[in-house]
Amino acid sequence: MLREITLGQYYPVDSLIHRLDPRTKLLGTLVFLVSLFLSRSIWGYLLATAALAAVIRMSRVPFAYMVKGLKAVVILLLISVSFNLFLTSGEVLIQVWIFKITREGIRLAGFMAVRLIYLILGSTIMTLTTTPNALTDGLEKGLGCLNRVGVPVHEISMMMSIALRFIPILVEETDKIMKAQMARGADFESGNLIQRVKAMVPLLVPLFISAFRRATDLAMAMEARCYRGGEGRTKMKPLHYGSCDYKAYGLMLVYLTGSIILRYL
């Protein structure tokens, strides 16, 4: 399960999506996420499906590699779908004891499941096709106007980049700790859900110690290199828009306009 978390990982391959400016990908991801909350009919989700399928194909990242990241949120998905399925009022189709399944509940649960899956896939595509350094530069450059009102854009971008970079590191560290404890007789697979959750508690102490140790090492390394934030710093690889980025912005505008039109039809 831990090895199947893909958020925060970078998949190196030469594709059109990989070559786009990180600011373009950040804005594209934001537009896609907004369109999911605008959609209220099947036509809006069909448009989102077509756009997502096109981006996945152009990214040249294997679809199976993206989908395996969904296994880590199956429990969250089931809880969300169950609440919408059984607690939505409307025309009752099936009733078992106090549980009622309504026509509106089925519709809302289906849309909620698709929305959650697409939210994860859309965010995953951005991290799989953008290096952490490029993501930091894109966030800092894209939100640079907020510096005028006192928002520490560089520090916020750096923290987000470090957090994303630490996800695969902590996953790998957790996997190593689990294997070490299983070699000493620990059992993480058998028993019901509550027993398996209790069995995971001994992992927390060594995992937190490892995380704090890595954070301390990173802070010392940054201080040793005289890191002092973004004031007056230059970039080794300055960001520049290309023709593909302007075309992508045009497609985003068309897509967002279509989503708004489909919402009110």
Image: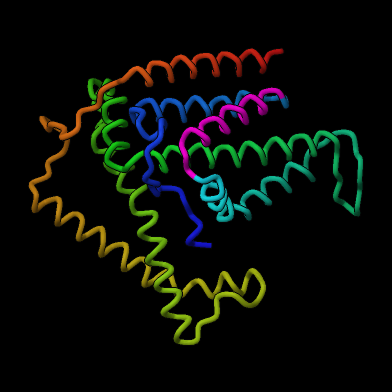
The image shows residue 181 at horizontal and vertical percentages of 44, 80
Q: Residue at x 73, y 40 (%)?
A: 109
Q: Which residue is drawn at the image coordinates 54% and 26% (left, top)?
A: 34
Residue 123 location (% of width, % of height): 48, 39
Residue 194 at x, y = what percent?
Answer: 63, 70
- 79 is higher (above) or lower (below) than 123: below
Locate residue 178 relative to residue 237 in the image: left or right: right
Q: How many marks?
A: 0
Indicate yes or no whether the magenta region holds residue 91.
no
Residue in view at x 62 percent, y 31 percent? 49
Whether residue 202 is situated above or below residue 225 in the rendered picture:
below
Q: Quadrant of the C terminus?
A: top right
In the image, which residues are magenta? 43-61
Q: Main secondary structure of the magenta part?
A: helix
State yes or no: residue 56 in magenta: yes
Q: Is residue 34 left or right of residue 75?
A: left
Q: Quadrant of residue 141?
A: top left
Q: Residue furthest bottom?
A: 185
Q: Nearer the viewer, residue 13 or 143?
A: 13
What's the colour scheme? Answer: rainbow
**In the displayed structure, does residue 152 sit left or right of residue 73?**
left
Q: Measured from the top left, where is residue 79 in percent x and y? A: 67, 51
- Identify the residue shown where x is 47% and y is 30%: 29
